[in-house]
Image (tube, rainbow, N blue to C red):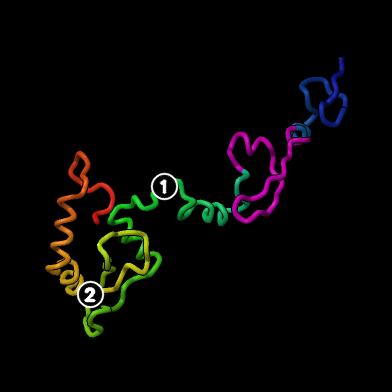
Amino acid sequence: MDKLCLFCKKNIAVNKFCSLKCFQKNRSVGKYVYKSCEECGKVRRLLLRYIKHYGWGKFCSKKCQYLGSVGEKSSCWKGDNITYTALHSWVYRRRGKPNKCEFNHEHRGRFDWANKSGLYERVLDDWIMLCRSCHLRYDYSDLRRKKMSHNAKNAERDKLGRFVGNIN
């Protein structure tokens, strides 16, 4: 009893397909979907099985995939609940490496980003470049030290003794 190839309809003795080529072509017939990139909007044709099995189809390229998952679009984005170190890294990426002291331009050595208000929020205008010695003098001036210690005493703390929220 002769069978027919499911793709090209040739007579075959065994199996469902006459060749590997017919098998592969049959897998993709009528199973294409047109999807637009979530980042740039470019439309492209994808096999439905790639979308189902591998989760492909959201982005058209690695570049769009990266742009679609950085900053506020990231699943790890914390908004204003950011840690001290992560906030300094955020400022460093946005404003670059500090290269001068804004209090005394003649100072040399290491430079830091210093927070002006002490609130540590995502506001780039709230940061200044200072040399290490000016930074320590600025952060631990008498008036500011009193303000920070007073606010720290009245601030909420979690079970481990860390501050919760902003210290105002």
What residue is disc 2 on? 131
Distance (Cα) linking label 2 and label 1: 32 Å
Q: How many numbered marks does the figure carry? A: 2
Residue at 47%, 54% in the rendered image: 70
Element type at marker 2?
strand
Residue at 19%, 41% in the rendered image: 160
Residue projecting furthest to the bottom: 106
Quarter of the image that includes the C terminus: bottom left
Element type at marker 1?
loop
Is residue 4 placed above or below 61 in the rendered structure?
above
- Image coordinates of residue 67 in percent, x first then y, are 53, 56
Q: Is residue 151 left or right of residue 70?
A: left
Is residue 70 placed above or below 97 in the rendered structure?
above
Q: Residues within 10 Å of mark 1 (few under 14, many from 20)?
A: few
Question: Which is nearer the eye, 138 or 42?
Answer: 138
Determine the image quadrant of residue 106: bottom left
Residue at 73%, 33% in the rendered image: 27
Q: Amino acid at mark 1?
A: Cys
Q: Is residue 113 left or right of residue 95?
A: left
- Image coordinates of residue 136 in percent, x first then y, are 17, 69
Taking the magenta stretch, the answer to whether it contains residue 43 is yes
* Mark with earlier residue (2, 1): 1
Quarter of the image that includes the N terminus: top right
- Image coordinates of residue 24 in percent, x first then y, are 73, 35
What residue is disc 1 on? 76
Q: Is residue 64 left or right of residue 122?
A: right
Question: Which is nearer the eye, 87 or 12?
Answer: 87
Q: Amino acid at mark 2?
A: Cys
Determine the image quadrant of residue 134: bottom left
Magenta residues, start to end: 27-56
